[in-house]
Image: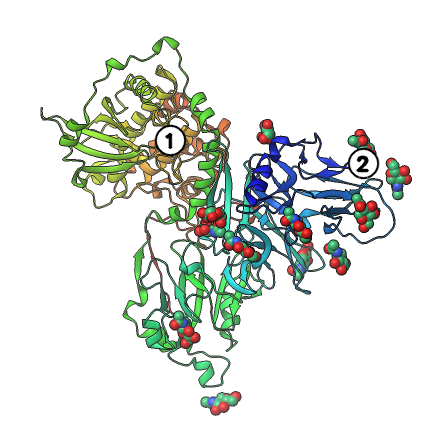
Amino acid sequence: MNKNIISFVLSLVPLLCLCLDTDTLTSNITFRDSDTIISGGHVFKLGFFSPVNTTNRYLAVFYNVSEKTTVWIANRDRPLNDSSGTVTFSRNGNLVLTNGRNETLWSTNVTGTYPRNTSAQIQNNGNFVLSDTSTRSIIWESFSHPSDVFLPTMRISDNIYTGHKMVIPAWKNESDPEPGSWIGGLEALNVPQIFIWNNGRPYWRSGPWNGMILSGVPDMYSPYLALFSLWNDTTGTFYMTPHELRFLTRYSLNSTGNIETTMWNNQQRKWDVTWVAVQNECDVYQTCGPFGSCNIRDSPICSCTRGFEPVNNEEWESGNWTSGCARRRQLSCEQSNNTSGNRDGFLRLRFTKVPDFAERFPSSQPDVCRTRCMSNCSCIAYAHDSYIGCMSWSEPLVDFQMFNGVGIDLFLRLEASELDNHSDRMLVIIIPVVVGFAAISFVMIIAWFWNKRKGKRFAKSAIVFKDESEKANVEELPLFSFEILSNATNQFHENHLLGRGGFGFVYKGYLENGKVIAVKRLSTASGQGTEEFMNEVVVISKLQHRNLVRLIGCCVEGEEKMLIYEYMPNKSLDGCLFDPNHLSHKILDWKKRFSIIESIGRGLMYLHKDSILKIIHRDLKPSNVLLDEDWNPKISDFGMARIFGGNEDFDNTSRVVGTYGYMAPEYAMEGRFSEKSDVYSFGVLMLEIISGKKNTHYYNQELSLSLLGCAWKLWNEENCLNFVDQTIESSNFEGEIVRCIHIALLCIQEFPNERPSIQTILSMISREIINLQMPKQPVFAEKWNRSHVGTITTQRSSPVGYPCSNDLTITVLDGR
Ligand SMILES: *[C@@H]1O[C@H](CO)[C@@H](O)[C@H](O)[C@H]1NC(C)=O
Ligand SMILES: *[C@@H]1O[C@H](CO)[C@@H](O)[C@H](O)[C@H]1NC(C)=O
Ligand SMILES: *[C@@H]1O[C@H](CO)[C@@H](O)[C@H](O)[C@H]1NC(C)=O
Ligand SMILES: *[C@@H]1O[C@H](CO)[C@@H](O)[C@H](O)[C@H]1NC(C)=O
Ligand SMILES: *[C@@H]1O[C@H](CO)[C@@H](O)[C@H](O)[C@H]1NC(C)=O
Ligand SMILES: *[C@@H]1O[C@H](CO)[C@@H](O)[C@H](O)[C@H]1NC(C)=O
Ligand SMILES: *[C@@H]1O[C@H](CO)[C@@H](O)[C@H](O)[C@H]1NC(C)=O
Ligand SMILES: *[C@@H]1O[C@H](CO)[C@@H](O)[C@H](O)[C@H]1NC(C)=O
Ligand SMILES: *[C@@H]1O[C@H](CO)[C@@H](O)[C@H](O)[C@H]1NC(C)=O
Ligand SMILES: *[C@@H]1O[C@H](CO)[C@@H](O)[C@H](O)[C@H]1NC(C)=O
Ligand SMILES: *[C@@H]1O[C@H](CO)[C@@H](O)[C@H](O)[C@H]1NC(C)=O
Ligand SMILES: *[C@@H]1O[C@H](CO)[C@@H](O)[C@H](O)[C@H]1NC(C)=O
């Protein structure tokens, strides 16, 4: 028989399949190539499978929704070359896979010769277990023999005494599941880390586990995420397991040596890659050699830190960094053979992925780490983390990276003169306000997926017609031709670009009659048809309120979809609020700010309650609030989620509806939204308007409180005026300001039902309601600490000391 016929026949197999309506194999069943069993919740199946470009058959566990995606394979290195495979139970209870010639290709191979009755079950977490029917104990499970996939509730492990590891071996290539040269696993000695090894040599390293996250993975720095747990038992074995998420998630080591996190996109019925371990050259182990530091934003990416120079200049210049850097001046403790080493100091490197081979010493005091390191001449660097304690290094520093805004501070021992003779010793930088944002793609992605999965349903349920008679008539809204808009914006020239919103670019345009307009050119990703789109737009255009930006027309031609708005001369609130040099910043005195808060509230109230549609904005933030010539705020981008239907990502990148920092926790984490999630965003917005600062998230030791935490702390200390923007003359309005902060704190409560409705908020602001409830500590107020792991409902300790000052500058280099 020729190969094509075989594969044709095999391709028919699923159709002929006699799916056994059970999740369990018992000894009276003979399980053949065409059979499958499915787990109780219909998530996983056990059956036979062929990888791409091969007709070889393997016994495997795969997803019900995606039968080509396996999570476990039995006969990885002994494929069947036809469909003659059968699974039976041997006399001693083992499960055995045999081919047509009765040769054993695979067996559970549990020792014990005595006869016993067993059964094998495929569980809903993907685990395939063999248990003794009389004792009901599990005698074998597929989770203890992992293939290339690490699933929620599965464990990998490492014993620090024996070195025995349970690892994830990758496939040889996409057509051959045989274990290849790549292995992923846990290395628990000293400080636990995850590694990818190639032929036993490290290729990627996650950085130390700090009780919550892998500290060398910037994408994990987010308070929303508790992705893994790590624990140990008394035998010295450390275990790590991914938490179960609300959507199908797999962490797999692919055959080219990268860990991919993939999530099932139920709408598009495909797997989407949401994160990969090795994203750039800096992530490759030891790219810059010993003492070389890697920073992906620099060019070249490798550099020697201060006090060091390339070992081989020529190689280094040519981009071969493997031999690394060497110390320029010997440490004084080495020179004098004097262990006290008083002439040495430490250079502070902020935001690093710390080097490999850390030694650990438990201590809560950073000073203890310093003293210990100073007193030992072989200690060349130290770091402190509140969970790990002291880390110190006595071997050449390898594989360290500089991050932006997240990471651990590393203190590098240098000879004193290296620290002194630099004029830039106290280099002061401004931390960009966007710092934390780069680090949270993980959570964005998760929120995105959740939204994608649920998007359609939400989009429908979020906005309901109060009156079915409000069906739109397309003729009512002015239609502009593409040509007119193109001319008005000088062919969408970048000089006309006003900004980039969540759903496309916005241009300023001049119509021939002299009227100034704002043209929002939507990305083409909307899944809607033209008629549906127009209907939505017409309905949205009927919403009219003085605190909403007015839609004056639209344009639909081919792939192009554009919305035309009135032009707002004072641009967006974030422009004038967060730019201290901007003149308008000073125009915003307290009275203006108060009225802006009130007006935004009224606009929101209209959306939630008063309009013909009930609209949840879902992305309320300063850049979506525009200011007219009299500084009246107008909410923009309302109804966009509706216009975009369920397909919320405006382009094919991972963009969510909603912006980190403004999203309520239940929305970000679980995709649940309601009017109360808009109230949360409104609370954040209020605090930003009052303080003139952006709600940023720092997870570094000293900069750890967010704006929300700062508000909470100062409010508790009855020190609210320190929270207020310095440019505001606040002394005359103290009562009003304190009240506004109080209301804002009520808006950002953790649980939606503890937040007031927008109606109540307006009554509070206007003092129709005098007595306000006491707020509880808002969510995300505090820096991460261990009490947050796994649960966000536990009682938290009171905030730690934090300088909630207006000073955004920090020192990066601190040689003592
Ligand atoms: C196999 O045995 C189990 C009990 O051990 C029984 O419930 C089941 O019906 C039997 N299946 C068949 C196909 O005989
Ligand atoms: C499992 O797959 C079958 C067939 O592919 C399908 O009919 C069924 O709905 C799936 N179950 C779930 C829970 O997705
Ligand atoms: C499978 O084979 C086709 C044709 O030979 C080739 O184009 C494709 O890249 C192969 N796929 C994989 C995953 O190797
Ligand atoms: C499968 O492999 C066996 C040897 O293990 C060989 O004898 C047999 O001919 C092969 N069958 C096919 C269809 O290639
Ligand atoms: C397969 O071999 C086993 C012993 O290895 C034997 O007990 C069994 O009867 C054989 N089955 C067939 C179908 O020949
Ligand atoms: C079963 O395990 C023994 C050692 O415990 C090993 O020698 C043997 O090759 C294994 N058999 C199979 C089929 O894996
Ligand atoms: C296994 O089950 C069979 C039939 O149910 C029974 O006759 C036999 O005694 C059982 N064997 C053991 C070891 O329990
Ligand atoms: C995969 O590896 C096997 C050998 O292990 C080789 O025969 C086969 O050609 C490879 N397939 C691809 C697509 O590289
Ligand atoms: C393992 O955990 C226990 C607490 O459960 C702890 O006392 C012990 O020191 C740990 N062992 C190691 C080697 O860290
Ligand atoms: C492995 O993952 C990386 C990152 O997603 C990807 O670039 C690469 O193509 C993948 N390799 C295979 C064989 O799928
Ligand atoms: C880089 O330098 C090392 C050490 O000198 C040498 O062994 C290696 O071959 C060089 N690599 C390349 C790509 O030139
Ligand atoms: C320091 O001690 C080493 C041997 O331990 C010796 O070779 C060296 O000369 C000493 N240096 C000084 C400055 O004493």
Q: Percent from the top left, x then y, of residue 183? A: 57, 58
Residue 805 sits above or below residue 161 on the image: above
In the picture shown, does residue 711 fall above or below 439? above
The front one of 787 and 459 is 459
Residue 742: image quadrant is top left
Q: Is residue 515 above or below residue 130?
A: above
Q: Is residue 214 visible?
A: no
> Looking at the image, which is closer to me, 230 or 277?
277
Query: As drawn, is 426 to the left or to the right of 646?
Result: left
Residue type for callout 1: Phe
Crowd band around label 1 with a 10 angstrom C-alpha radius: few (<14), some (14–19), many (20+):
many
Q: Is residue 311 left or right of residue 775?
A: left
Along the line of sight, the residue nearer the viewer: 88 or 116: 88
Q: Position of residue 582 (x, y in %)?
A: 20, 43
Identify the residue position indicated by label 1 in the image.
682
Q: Residue at x 49, y 68 (%)?
A: 370
At mark 2, the secondary structure is: loop
Query: Where residue 361 sits in the image (x, y, percent)?
Result: 58, 65
Image quarter where the N terminus lies is top right
Query: Any mark on residue 580, and which?
Result: none
Residue 588 rendering spot, x and y as whole percentages: 23, 36
Identity of the residue drawn at 51% across and 71% down: 373
Give the Cα distance between marks 1 and 2: 63 Å
Instruction: Quarter of the image for the C terminus: give it.
Output: bottom left
The extreme left residue here reads 513
Query: Which badge, 1 or 2, comes first in the chain's sequence?
Result: 2
Indicate the amino acid at tag 2.
Asn
Spot the residue most to the top: 469
Q: How many marks?
A: 2
Label 2 within 8 A of ligand 1 by Cβ: yes
Closest to the observer: 798 or 497? Answer: 497
Per the image, the residue denoted by label 2 is 28
